[in-house]
Image (cartoon, rainbow, N blue to C red):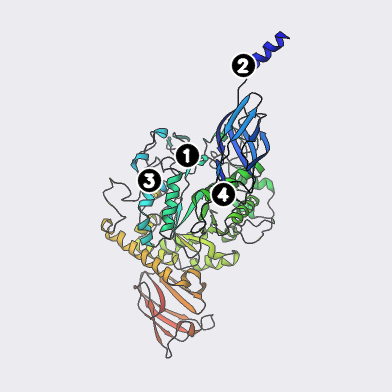
């Protein structure tokens, strides 16, 4: 008996008590529509653990650990009578007890938050690290020393949340109504040696290599500063769209070598599929699952661990994470990265959870393809052949992006644009397509076209259907080739910059001309409701001339673009169209004149059902009745 007691005592001496190193989510809200919440607790020696709450208001439910004892799942039921406060959980094993901190918060006030976005908005894409450095103190943080170097294109350059806050008035003056911020997740604190270019490791300054889905990248600021940015934008009448990623993690995420479940990822670091990018198979009713497998389960660049949304535990984690970011910051929308590489059934559940709590919230998904038939398959609003309605509100209009580049930078015939827009019949809601000239993933427009081309491209962007998006710096004609050259620092965002393009006095004549032109377009779009909400009617698609009308009730705006190098006489016959003359002409004795809101084109003559104008070369006009 004495020998047995000694053995037990020795075993207890070497047995390890549970440890808790992270709780996700760290908090939730009273009265939230998602309840119970499933906590993911990371630590050590968690196998066989139970969770207890000594505070009334929360009740622990199902609890289970992974085989390694490094993760513990705990269902937490938040009672209706629960009040905001601290609700620590006791994690108990036969070898000891640990505390898992957890809080309940009051929800953020709804007024002025969670607003969504629409065709009334103009979105501005900001890559935080490359826009403006408002706080040099976080350029080279102690926790991630050595990743800051403005002379290296793939290192951190110092842009941060404070820099964006400082320049919100600039964006307001331009006419921007919504900001799209690239991901704010915490990224690895050392060089990324698994993704190299020219034999050199890089940093994950771009934000797409998350190692903590509940952390904020320290180079940018912290959660409190991010919330300040959102509140500051709201105070100026601007919305905020946050970039999120549910498809993959960064290569250094702790899960990569120690996953919460055996099926948390599609494959492992040692054994996984490489993505083949065959998105078309997902919209093919004849394609077997085996053909779609590498697209849905393959790892991006054969590097980024692919999350398995078919694992219910993974799916719930991602849904809760999205709701946590929305509830914590008060953002108005999400830009969802790599949308098609995730099962559409997950997007349906994800969107349903978002809309249940935030009905006005909106999501735009990245579906990178120039085939309208394929892109339209991923927009929500109807069930597809697979029986799934993704529910995703908006998509980026990559088909129109390609046509804009061909039509304005390479001077393709105008019908190129009309042909792409003619595919609007395929979309559940073409007005919820986000239109753009370029982004952080493409060469800048100025790498293909010139200033006059850029003006013409902006003219279409701001007048056609959809939600226009401006990539930071395009409003001053910033140049830039492929990644990372297309992610140059905005001139003036750093104290040492010799030029400050945030100020009119710091812009070159060319930069100022483009800025003012975009500003005029933005103001015309704000002033003329048909440009934002009206139906579109093509009027002329001939050679280098494209003319169309935007019609809203009895209000009509006619847009005429001449991309040719010479003047073009344009005659528009609207007989037999939905534009009766009284919709434009309110005077009793036509003919009369239509005025170009941009001030570049001459007046156009209107006589009942015919409009005529001599359009100067490389000119756009927005025609309305002269008041």
Q: In the rendered image, which quarter contains the C terminus?
A: bottom left
Q: What is the distance, in whole Å, between disc 4 and disc 2 at their CAs? A: 43 Å
Q: Residue 465 location, x and y as percent?
A: 50, 67
Q: Earlier in the sequence, mark 4 or mark 2?
A: 2
Q: Residue 518 location, x and y as percent?
A: 37, 64
The disc label shown at residue 323, or none: 4
Q: Which residue is mark 2?
A: 13
Q: What is the distance, in whole Å, between disc 4 and disc 3 at their CAs? A: 26 Å
- Locate residue 386: give its quadrant: bottom right
Give the camera-side residue of 225 and 495: 225
Q: Earlier in the sequence, mark 4 or mark 3?
A: 3
Callout in the foreground (4, 2) = 2
Callout in the foreground (2, 3) = 2
Give the left or right position of residue 128, taking residue 580 as reference.
left
C-beta proximity under 8 Å, tags 4 and 3: no
Give the camera-side residue of 89 and 70: 89
Q: What is the distance, in whole Å, between disc 2 and disc 3 at their CAs? A: 51 Å
> Which residue does the image show at 42% across and 87% down from the upper left?
587
Q: What is the distance, in whole Å, between disc 1 and disc 2 at their CAs? A: 38 Å
Question: Element type at marker 1?
Answer: strand
> Which residue does the image show at 38% across and 34% down from the upper left?
146
The disc label shown at residue 159, or none: 3
Mark 4 is surrounded, within 10 Å at the Cα level, by few (under 14), some (14 to 19) or many (20 or more) other residues, namely: some
Q: Which residue is mark 1?
A: 187
Q: In the rendered image, which quarter contains the N terminus?
A: top right
């Amino acid at each position: 008996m004495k020998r047995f007691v000694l053995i037990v005592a020795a075993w207890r001496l070497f047995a390890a008590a549970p440890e808790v190193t992270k709780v996700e989510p760290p908090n939730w809200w009273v009265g939230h529509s998602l309840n119970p919440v499933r906590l993911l607790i990371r630590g050590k020696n968690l196998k066989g653990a139970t969770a207890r709450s000594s505070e009334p208001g929360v009740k622990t439910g199902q609890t289970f650990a992974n085989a390694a004892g490094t993760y513990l799942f705990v269902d937490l039921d938040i009672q209706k009578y629960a009040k905001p406060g601290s609700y620590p959980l006791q994690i108990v094993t036969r070898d000891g007890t640990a505390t898992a901190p957890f809080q309940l918060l009051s929800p953020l006030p709804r007024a002025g938050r969670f607003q969504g976005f629409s065709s009334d908005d103009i979105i501005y894409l900001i890559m935080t690290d490359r826009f403006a450095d408002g706080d040099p103190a976080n350029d080279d943080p102690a926790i991630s020393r050595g990743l800051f170097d403005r002379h290296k294109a793939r290192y951190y350059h110092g842009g941060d949340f404070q820099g964006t806050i400082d320049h919100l008035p600039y964006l307001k003056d331009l006419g921007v109504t919504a900001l799209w911020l690239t991901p704010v997740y915490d990224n690895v604190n050392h060089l990324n040696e698994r993704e190299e270019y020219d034999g050199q490791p890089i940093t994950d300054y771009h934000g797409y290599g998350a190692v903590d889905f509940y952390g904020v990248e320290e180079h940018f600021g912290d959660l409190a500063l991010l919330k300040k940015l959102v509140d500051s934008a709201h105070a100026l009448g601007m919305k905020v769209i946050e970039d999120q990623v549910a498809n993959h993690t960064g290569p250094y995420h702790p899960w990569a070598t120690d996953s919460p479940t055996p099926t948390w990822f599609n494959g492992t670091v040692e054994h996984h599929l490489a993505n083949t990018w065959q998105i078309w198979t997902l919209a093919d009713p004849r394609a077997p699952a085996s053909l779609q497998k590498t697209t849905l389960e393959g790892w991006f660049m054969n590097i980024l661990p692919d999350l398995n949304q078919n694992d219910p535990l993974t799916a719930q984690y991602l849904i809760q994470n999205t709701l946590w970011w929305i509830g914590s910051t008060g953002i108005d929308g999400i830009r969802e990265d790599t949308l098609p590489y995730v099962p559409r059934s997950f997007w349906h559940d994800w969107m349903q959870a978002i809309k249940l709590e935030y009905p006005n919230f909106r999501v735009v998904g990245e579906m990178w393809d120039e085939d309208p038939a394929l892109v339209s398959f991923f927009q929500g609003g109807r069930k597809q052949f697979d029986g799934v309605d993704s529910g995703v509100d908006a998509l980026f209009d990559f088909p129109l992006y390609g046509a804009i580049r061909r039509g304005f930078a390479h001077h393709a015939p105008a019908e190129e644009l009309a042909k792409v827009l003619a595919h609007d019949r395929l979309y559940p809601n073409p007005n919820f397509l986000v239109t753009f000239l370029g982004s952080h993933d493409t060469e800048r427009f100025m790498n293909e076209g010139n200033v006059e081309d850029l003006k013409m491209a902006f003219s279409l962007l701001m007048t056609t259907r959809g939600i226009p998006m401006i990539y930071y710096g395009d409003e001053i004609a910033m140049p830039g080739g492929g990644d990372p050259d297309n992610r140059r620092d905005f001139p003036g965002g750093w104290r040492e910059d010799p030029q400050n393009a945030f100020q009119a006095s710091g812009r070159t004549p060319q930069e100022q001309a483009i800025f003012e032109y975009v500003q005029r377009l933005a103001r015309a779009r704000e002033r003329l409701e048909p440009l934002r909400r009206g139906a579109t009617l093509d009027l002329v698609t001939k050679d280098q001339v494209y003319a169309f009308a935007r019609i809203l009730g009895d209000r009509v705006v006619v847009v005429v673009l001449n991309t040719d190098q010479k003047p073009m006489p344009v005659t528009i016959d609207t007989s037999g169209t939905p534009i009766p003359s009284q919709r434009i002409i309110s005077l009793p004795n036509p003919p009369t004149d239509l005025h170009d809101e941009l001030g570049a084109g001459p007046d156009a003559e209107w006589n009942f059902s015919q409009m005529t104008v001599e359009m100067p070369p490389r000119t756009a006009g927005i025609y309305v009745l002269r008041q």
